[in-house]
Amino acid sequence: MSKKMIAQVHGEKKFKKWRRGYKNRPPRVSSFSAHYPGNDDRYPKYVKDVRFSVFESLIRTIAHGKVELHRKFPKTESLSDCCKRTIPYFKDVIIPNSIAKNKSVLIASSENAIRGLLMELCEIPAKKIHELEIPTGVPIIYDVKKKRIRLLDDGLTPDPIERYNFGEAKSYIFRPCEEDLDDECNQCYLDSGGGAYAYDPLIRLPQPMPVVTSVVKSNVTSSATVLGY
């Protein structure tokens, strides 16, 4: 079902808990559902670190008329469950093999996995994580030193930080400026929407090089010289 249909069937309150809550699991899917990971050929083929299930193996052995071993894939999952898989992998594999070696890492994943990772990296409380929104398809750059995220400047207006919705927990991923602001403040970044941040939240495009045009005249000819610097 679509998200709209789920909200209509189960109610908006339950839907929001299942979709945004930290420990709220949605109803379990059936072993025969197309949404059950075990019915996706990629999971049985590539996943080797999940234990086998007696029940799942039995029903598939009976259904197919031959002995089959089937792993115990999750039939429902909360954000907490997701974090138990993703955070250890980030700490045990990605950090030592890439980040500790000053390598850049590209992580492409579902919104829920990204929310869980940002919860860990930006120290977002569990009671606030439901207020964080992750815009679809927007590159997010995590600054290891500042422990906050930055966005790529795409040259459009308004800036991405104003254009996209990051939810009410936005201040946890973009550090707000703690200084008393006035017209002379030069320590905080101010956006056109009145937001103030402790550092520029955008990785900006290189500015066009200034161009100086000088015209040199002589008795013979005139020439235009364009100098870029």
Image (cartoon, rainbow, N blue to C red):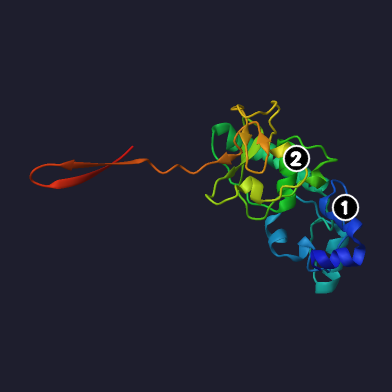
Residue 165: percent from left, percent from top? 71, 50
Q: Is 37 or 62 nearer to us in this picture?
A: 37
Q: Which residue is mark 2?
A: 119
Instruction: Determine whether 190 is above or below 67 in the image.
Output: above
Identity, as a three-letter code, of the amino acid under mark 2: Met
Residue type at numbered disc 1: Lys
Can the viewer see residue 93 in this picture? yes
Depth check, front residue: 181 or 206:
181
Residue 140: % across, % down: 62, 45
Q: Is residue 169 left or right of residue 196?
A: right
Q: In the drawing, what numbered circle is on residue 59?
A: none
In the image: residue 129, left or right of residue 179: right
- Where disc 1 sits, the SS reads helix
Q: Nearer the viewer, residue 227 or 160?
A: 227
- Please tell me which of labels 1 and 2 falls first in the chain: 1
Say what secondary structure mark 2 lies in: helix
Image point (78%, 48%), residue name: 82
Q: Which residue is mark 1?
A: 17
Q: Residues within 10 Å of mark 2 (few under 14, many from 20)?
A: many
Give percent across and percent down for residue 79: 81, 48
At horizontal 58% and vertical 41% (from top left) the residue drawn is: 202
- Is 96 displayed left or right of 17 in the figure? left
The residue positioned farthest toward the left in the image shown: 220
Q: Quadrant of residue 148?
A: top right
Question: Where does the C terminus fall, quadrant-wise?
Answer: top left
Between residues 176 and 147, which one lies in front from this camera angle? 176
Q: CA distance from mark 1 to mark 2?
A: 17 Å
